[in-house]
Image (spheres, coloured by chain):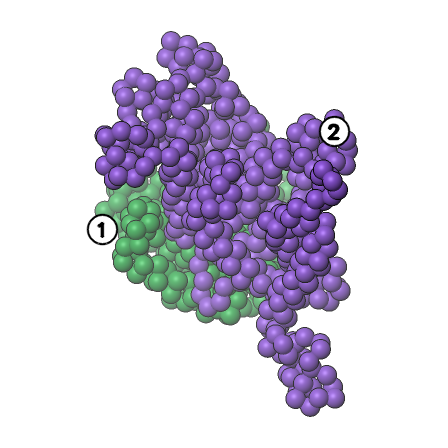
Amino acid sequence: MAAGNQDMPASETNPEGAQALGEDRARAFQQEPPERSANFYDSLRDAGLTALLAGVLGFFFIGLRTEIAPGGLDITTRWRAWIISILIVFGARLFLNIFLFRAKRSTRRKARAEGGGFAAIMPTVGKILTWLLLAFAIVLPFFFTTFMPTRERQFIDMAILIMTYIMLGWGLNIVVGLAGLLDLGYVAFYAVGAYSFALLAHYFHFGFWMALPLAGILAATWGVILGFPVLRLRGDYLAIVTLAFGEIVRVVLLNWYSFTNGPDGISGIPKPTVFGYELGRGQDTINGILGIPYEPIQRFIFLYYIIFILALITNFITIRLRRLPIGRAWEALREDEIACRSLGINTRNTKLTAFAIGAMFGGFAGSFFATRQGFVSPESFTFLESAIILSIVVLGGLGSQLGVVIAAVVMIGGTEMLRNLDFLKSIFGDNFDPVQYRMLIFGLAMVIIMVWKPRGLIATRTPSAIYKEKKRISADLVAQGEGH
Amino acid sequence: MDAAQSSTGAPAVHRWENDPILTVEHLSMRFGGLVAVGDLSFNVGRGDITALIGPNGAGKTTVFNCVTGFYKPTEGRIAMRHGEGRLEKEVEELTASSARFKETTGGSVFLLERMPDHEISARAKVARTFQNIRLFSGMTVLENLLVAQHNALMLASSYTLGGIFGLPGYKKARAAAIEKAIYWLEQINLVDRADEPAGDLPYGAQRRLEIVRAMCTDPRLLCFDEPAAGLNPRESAELNELLKFIRDKHDTSILLIEHDMGVVMEISDHIVVLDYGVKISDGDPAFVRTDPKVIAAYLGVEDEEEIDVAEVQQDVAARVEGDIGAMPDAPTAPDNSGGASKP
């Protein structure tokens, strides 16, 4: 089908091709244009060509390197950098083909794309991307230990950080994306979770696994406590009160010196254990029992899998909730609160559950943060954190799970990667320090994404119930809820 | 009391007096100094289509909002009954107590002025539609109808817990809910568009969808706020059929606000006329359309011949003489006739 649709093999002179062309034309008038798969293959082919070009050019520029050596020039090869650059070009080109360059199509094709083509290709691409990302996330620590053994710690640590933000994004997505309640104080629940574990460990010597559910429950309780006063608020007022709530929690943690140790924070928070045994050297550790020699990287890998599984649970529950009456009620609440009340939905309880469940996941992430750092202080829970989490949700597309992942990787990973832009020194001189421009580039990127895709990277809504055929709903119809 | 009066006055006792599903008694609603509704009493008969009509600004929507709990009335009692008859004793007992409702097998009674809006829909089974359509436009047609079955599905999913673990009870309830939604979509010819966003539907279809969405809450009383507004004559006729179908086949009484006299006169069993927040007429269509007070308030009905011109002139003269401050009446009167004759 794809081959028949490409211009080259099907010509008018070749009867077989002409017939195929005619069939394709006929099919084009029907509902599902064959173009949608062709679009994807075209994009793939185009990306492949670009990667080939990059490979040819990069062979000389990146693959080979000449250095002044005693007695002349010395050639060194850098095959890994070369392959990585080809992969980057391929990936970027494919991304641009699918998401950006469609805007340059003719109006007719664009109109069709809006109606079915692009909206129809999205699930395929989305599904492929989801599984690819999931597969990569599963093998990620081993990928880094195998391919980048020199910097494995740095990369796995960064993956842990990104995964934490993905989880926070998914948690906030319930409140902002599904229920449409703009919450600027989400970091408060993160703080409650982190301090719950820190204080339980400090005063009662709780371990991570014991404290984790308690931290979630406490954070959910705080979610309900925040939820009550803001039940009647809408729009900007809701945003301001949640913002204030976030600050109140931080200021209390800062000033309640006798209990929280104030700005000095709480240190010595225990690491997570494996069935009660710690990772480490010696007889009574898990390494000693299993007879595996201890390496510090194991601790990072273990932490990575903990947050990975926590995030997966968050995602699984959110997806499940969306298809349950409660999730549908959240979305209905975002669409029209008055209509909800006329249909017998208790909007107070519905809002409170959204706040509580969102806060619970924030609390889980917070207690993971505490165990990972081994130290908590109010400094980690400033408004900037709330803003970053909210930006991840908004950039990703309100209510989109995959969008949150992409946005978190781009925002958190991207900011960290900007620290490593040493090659810019060769352009702007040795005094140029890219770290100083990090936030500028970051802000610019955000502005560009919002201009290009005002409703976030993934701006279609998947219906939660299907009668015959799954159709995606364009963002123009979906309400943004209160405070947008 | 009302029933006794009418039965002595007229030999034929109307159904809305013997077997009312809803009684509104001495309802007043004041916004600051403005009296939107003053001392209004009327009944809605079980199985009747009752129309609430009146010129623009007469307070019809305010009455609706009081009945459906969106406003708390300043004074008055609004009693909803699920059993047969007037259930005087139960209503009086409930009023004396501090409870909001009393559910018994014989006949449940609900005091709507004490209940919050969502409870009125969920327990007292009074559903409503809105003057400006309020669909969940970013959700599909099917999802709209599933949201309306929220409470039943919540119970079936054991308040989400059972649903998360995918218990069979919830799956069954979900399939039943979809079946019910499809049944209603068949009634309004929208099955083919079940998976499309509600916001993409044409206006007439959105109106019909809002009506069946309200029906999915299994109401005993359905309140429509101008269901025919903005519909063309063919769609209006379809709407009439739908309303009759709901009344006859689904044991649902209907209370509606409507400006389209064609719709009102054709389908109503009982008409209540409001003007300036006060009831000026109450009876069956034949009675109301010949009531001089109504003609005076409207100054324009469908059938020109039916207006008793002399009587109208007398009546208007009486009103103008009655209070000099009736000047504001003069500009509103042509306004109203314009409003009434609009499609």
Q: Quadrant of residue A40?
A: bottom right
User: Which one is in front in this view, the residue at disc 2 or the one at disc 1?
Assistant: 2
The residue at 34%/34% (across/down) is A294
Label 1 element class: loop
Q: Which chain is green?
A: B
Circle 2 sits on which residue? A430
Spatial CA distance of label 2 from label 1 is 89 Å
- The percent position of residue B117, horizontal first and vertical second, equals 43, 41
Tag 2: amino acid: Asp
Q: Quadrant of the N terminus of chain A?
A: bottom right
Circle 1 sits on which residue? B106
Which chain hosts label 2? A
Residue A38 visible from this viewpoint:
yes
Q: Which one is nearer the viewer's eye here, B55 or A330?
A: A330
Tag 1: amino acid: Gly
The residue at 59%/49% (across/down) is A80
Color of chain A here? purple
The residue at 69%/90% (across/down) is A15
